[in-house]
Amino acid sequence: MKQVEARINRERLWHTLSELGLIGRSPTGGINRLSLDAQDLLARSHVHALMLEAGLSVRQDEAGNLIGRLEGDCIDAPAVITGSHIDTVTEAGKFDGALGVLAGIEVLRTVKELGVKHHCPLEVICFTDEEGVRFGIGYLGSRAMAGEWSPEWLKAKDKDGISLNEAMIQADIDPSLAERAARPAGSIRAYLELHIEQGRVLEDANLPCGLATAIYGYRWLLVKFKGHADHAGTTPMALRRDALLAAAEAVIAIEKLAIRSGGTATVGTLKLSPGAVNVIPDEVIFTIDYRHSSIQALTEMGQQMETTLESLAFRRGLTVEVSETDGATPVTCSEQLTSMLTEVCGSIGIKAMPMVCGAGHDAVAIHSLTEIGLILVRSKDGISHHREEWSSLEDCSDGADILLHSMLRVAQKVLK
């Protein structure tokens, strides 16, 4: 069969998406598979079985990444890899991350079934903990593969006090060996990831797919305003040291700063104490997620945020603590791979557009190992990280077909 005629099995891909979407599903329809919890482990076992069913050799590396491999004509050649994650945020949809993993399995299964020859080995990877929701540190598996593992991460704890170290042991992953997951230089020829857009750009353009030219960098901050708890009725307004009022001003200031900078910023969690109706809040702890495609702009955003927070604290007689809990540098996708992806789209009749990706993906970490390319699939109404997240069978399949032909081009040494 000619390569240009090759297509993935659309119904099979959709079936696997639907099946995986049942694992961790709550009564309200959202999916909860926080990294290495019981539901995530069940899902990982399911993915392992799918890889075996597809005829792949399967192994789990020292960081818990699941790797399905299809050998090429030259087993010593660097691998062409794809992948994503299956851990979720709370009350998530079924496409974020899962599409990339399941489409990758489907692509390799299609190559094997059709007997398409390829020089380089092909791999699909289900990375450990991309979201960072449970322990506050994202890209754990892909960072480990990129040689960026930090033993300090093992001390991080979830809301129940369980450390990453404990969670890995419970998942039968030896945390003391995680750094051995690092792939040697030259072992990966290219990394191509398929992911839902998680935004409205493609829908507004009425296109099924996009090709990322760059991926936003991000920083996560933990902010603590500390004031004084007093009686809500007897303390005059001018004498108050209200931590919540400072936080309220900060949220508005952060929004304005993001707009001026051309980036994004979000206060996603907020906790106040003592939390009584008639007591002035003495402490507020909240998080900031801010992002930009330029490292200079990202750095300047952070500096301006800290200056603003310190100024608000001083004016209201408070103290403020700001700590960075996680982050990633903006990355540029390979011009060579993006050009090749564009050619593939044209050759198989799928319309796609170049765009900047605002969401972070495992490709960010793998970028330090090899050239990366990122295929994005249209998201209905731009909704993501929510149970109403949706991408159509047709769009998901189009993205998987682009991935199929692109991996084969690179694996067959068409890419120069």
Image: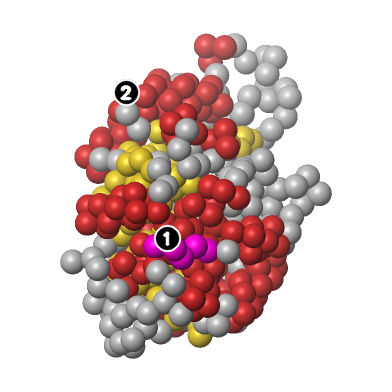
The answer to if 112 sits in the magenta stretch is: no
Magenta-tinted stretch: 4-8
Q: Which residue is found at the position 73% from the left and 59% from the top?
A: 22
First in residue order: circle 2 vs circle 1 = 2
Q: Residues within 10 Å of mark 2 (few under 14, many from 20)?
A: few
Task: Name the kind of residue labelled 1 in the image.
Answer: Leu
Of residue 15 and residue 189, the one placed in the foreground of this image is 15
Query: In this rendering, would 313 be left or right of 330?
Result: right
Comparing marks 2 and 1, which lies closer to the viewer?
A: 1
**Residue ID for mark 1:** 403
Per the model, the C-alpha gap separating discs 2 and 1 is: 36 Å
Query: In this rendering, would 297 be left or right of 56?
Result: left
Seen in the picture, residue 275 relative to 91 is either above or below; the reply is above
SS state under label 1: helix
Residue 409 visible in the displayed image: yes
Query: In this rendering, would 57 be left or right of 323?
Result: right
Q: Which residue is found at the position 47% from the left and 29% from the top?
A: 204
Q: Which residue is found at the position 64% from the left and 60% from the top?
A: 11
In which quadrant is the N terminus drawn? Answer: bottom left
**Residue ID for mark 2:** 260
Q: Residues within 10 Å of mark 1 (few under 14, many from 20)?
A: many
Q: Which residue is found at the position 52% from the left and 77% from the top?
A: 113
* Furthest residue toward left: 416
